[in-house]
């Protein structure tokens, strides 16, 4: 295999083929220096070797995938225009909740064993139409309702950087698969941080698009907190998949716009002169582990040294207030949907699922939906005021540096010596589902004491997607994470 394919040069160590980024792979496919079959075979070999240690996948579909890889190889061999299939030949892991027609559709529930999807989820439909090859599917907690990834159905998914720690949740299988080299691209979902938390804990990139930009599956696609999105190991790869997933879909009335047009390359990414960054470390009262704070400040300092104007701002939020706001929302929408779907089967559920439904039910009894909307509107106005005059807001993704792989955190969680009543109070993600028209890109910021990565969120003004990708590309250049791989 050529040096160009593996990323090897005389002066640099070899980059394993299973860690090749998607944009580079496409370039090599088009030049004839790499075949989709070669890439898929490498990913398959890596999966068989590494997945037993992390348990990131619910199933593999290697035989079907190889047939598609051979078709893609032939298409590149003919030398035609493949611009209408921007993912042609690329392996993609999809979250199990993103249904594939005829395949399992259980959301991790033992009581749903044997259920199958009748049609492809909108994002899966678009990935396949773009030439992407769905070769495996990733784990999540039940109903994607926890910040860790384990379930009675699929067992414990572990962080490739430290198997005693969690890759986060709920898209933990996606994050673990990317970090372990099981795919260059993955689908995720996010209703309170389920894309961004795994990105932080696995040293990968996750994107929460503005609500409606990426279509979802009715009827819960009408929930204005939720969103499906891409994860990858680079900013460019995340933009590539976001572009494919974006745009109006007839099955989702809230979806809007055409296909994404995010640039994949920013030639001047290291120069951020004039960029105005609002640094908000705690979003009010969130406690931070020392490494989280230090790494966030290091990202801000790198941007400032490259020409950005960085100023610290404060927000009048509390973790308890945000907890109450999101659970009021869940109590009137997601919670009742979960209870209806599990009526008569709740004894088989994981403890965190039963706790989530109970918390949501109690919150709905305390506050009406209108009261919840009032709280959301107040937070939206406060964020807009804090970001006035700035291009982006920069903050940590999680105050907790890592989570135990098999824990439930039913009795709360401690962060930096502060005991928090609810595990969601350890993470700085939910405020941006409350303000869900804001794009948020989660990128790596460094490592914590236990070897688990940490991350930051880059928050844009409503619908201003390119701003967060431009800032993310800058962070990637100024504090690069490429070439760091977990030793499984």
Image (cartoon, grey):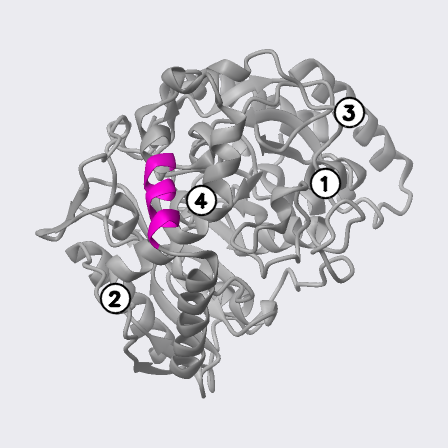
- Residue positioned most to the top: 114
- Tell me the distance, in whole angstroms, between the alpha carbons under discs 4 and 3: 30 Å
Which residue is disc 4 drawn over?
194
Q: Secondary structure at mark 2?
A: loop
Q: Earlier in the sequence, mark 1 or mark 3?
A: 3
Which residue is disc 1 drawn over?
122
> Which image quarter holds the N terminus?
top right
Residue occupying image coordinates x 55% and y 64%: 469
Chain part drawn in magenta: 357-366
Up-down: is 370 above or below 183?
A: below
Q: Earlier in the sequence, mark 1 or mark 4?
A: 1
Residue 39 lies in the magenta stretch: no
Residue occupying image coordinates x 24% and y 41%: 451
Question: For this rendering, which residue is in front, 442 or 481?
Answer: 442
Asked whether, in this view, residue 415 is left or right of residue 213, the answer is left
Crowding around mark 1 (Cα neighbors within 10 Å: few <14, some 14 to 19, many 20+) is many
Mark number displayed over residue 475 = none
Mark number displayed over residue 68 = 3
- Tell me the distance, in whole angstroms, between the alpha carbons under discs 2 and 3: 47 Å
Q: Earlier in the sequence, mark 4 or mark 3?
A: 3
Crowding around mark 3 (Cα neighbors within 10 Å: few <14, some 14 to 19, many 20+) is many
Residue 220 in the image: state x and y as whole percent: 60, 43
């Amino acid at each position: 295999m050529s040096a160009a394919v593996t990323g090897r040069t005389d002066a640099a160590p070899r980059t394993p083929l299973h860690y090749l980024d998607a944009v580079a792979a496409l370039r090599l496919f088009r030049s004839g220096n790499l075949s989709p079959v070669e890439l898929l075979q490498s990913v398959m070999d890596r999966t068989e070797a590494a997945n037993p240690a992390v348990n990131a996948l619910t199933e593999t579909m290697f035989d079907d995938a190889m047939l598609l890889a051979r078709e893609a190889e032939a298409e590149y061999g003919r030398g035609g225009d493949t611009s209408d299939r921007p993912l042609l030949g690329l392996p993609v892991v999809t979250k199990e909740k993103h249904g594939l027609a005829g395949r399992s559709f259980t959301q991790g529930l033992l009581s749903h064993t044997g259920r199958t999807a009748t049609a492809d989820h909108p994002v899966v439909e678009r990935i396949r139409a773009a030439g992407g090859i769905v070769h495996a599917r990733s784990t999540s907690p039940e109903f994607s309702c926890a910040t860790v990834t384990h379930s009675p159905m699929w067992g414990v998914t572990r962080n490739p950087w430290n198997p005693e720690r969690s890759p986060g949740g709920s898209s933990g299988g996606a994050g673990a698969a990317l970090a372990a080299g099981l795919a260059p691209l993955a689908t995720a979902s996010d209703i309170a941080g389920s894309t961004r938390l795994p990105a932080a804990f696995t040293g990968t990139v996750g994107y929460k698009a503005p609500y409606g930009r990426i279509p979802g599956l009715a009827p819960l696609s009408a929930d204005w907190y939720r969103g499906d999105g891409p994860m990858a190991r680079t900013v460019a790869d995340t933009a590539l998949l976001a572009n494919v997933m974006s745009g109006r879909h007839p099955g989702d009335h809230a979806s809007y716009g055409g296909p994404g047009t995010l640039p994949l390359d920013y030639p001047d990414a290291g120069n951020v002169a004039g960029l105005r960054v609002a640094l908000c470390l705690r979003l009010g009262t969130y406690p931070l582990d020392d490494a989280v704070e230090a790494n966030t400040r290091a990202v801000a300092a790198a941007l400032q040294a490259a020409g950005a104007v960085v100023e610290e701002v404060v927000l009048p939020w509390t973790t308890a207030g945000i907890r109450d706001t999101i659970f009021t929302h869940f109590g009137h929408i997601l919670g009742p949907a979960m209870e209806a779907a599990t009526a008569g089967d709740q004894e088989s559920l994981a403890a965190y699922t039963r706790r989530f439904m109970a918390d949501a039910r109690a919150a709905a009894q305390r506050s009406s939906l209108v009261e919840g909307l009032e709280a959301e509107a107040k937070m939206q106005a406060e964020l807009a005021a804090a970001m006035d005059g700035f291009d982006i807001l920069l903050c940590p993704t999680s105050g907790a540096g890592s989570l135990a792989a098999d824990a439930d955190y039913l009795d709360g969680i401690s962060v930096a010596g502060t005991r928090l009543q609810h595990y969601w109070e350890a993470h700085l993600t939910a405020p941006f589902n409350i303000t869900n028209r804001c794009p948020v890109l989660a990128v790596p910021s460094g490592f914590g004491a236990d070897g688990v990565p940490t991350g930051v969120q880059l928050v844009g003004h409503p619908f201003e997607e390119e701003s967060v990708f431009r800032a993310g590309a800058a962070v990637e250049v100024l504090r690069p994470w490429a070439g760091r791989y977990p030793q499984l």
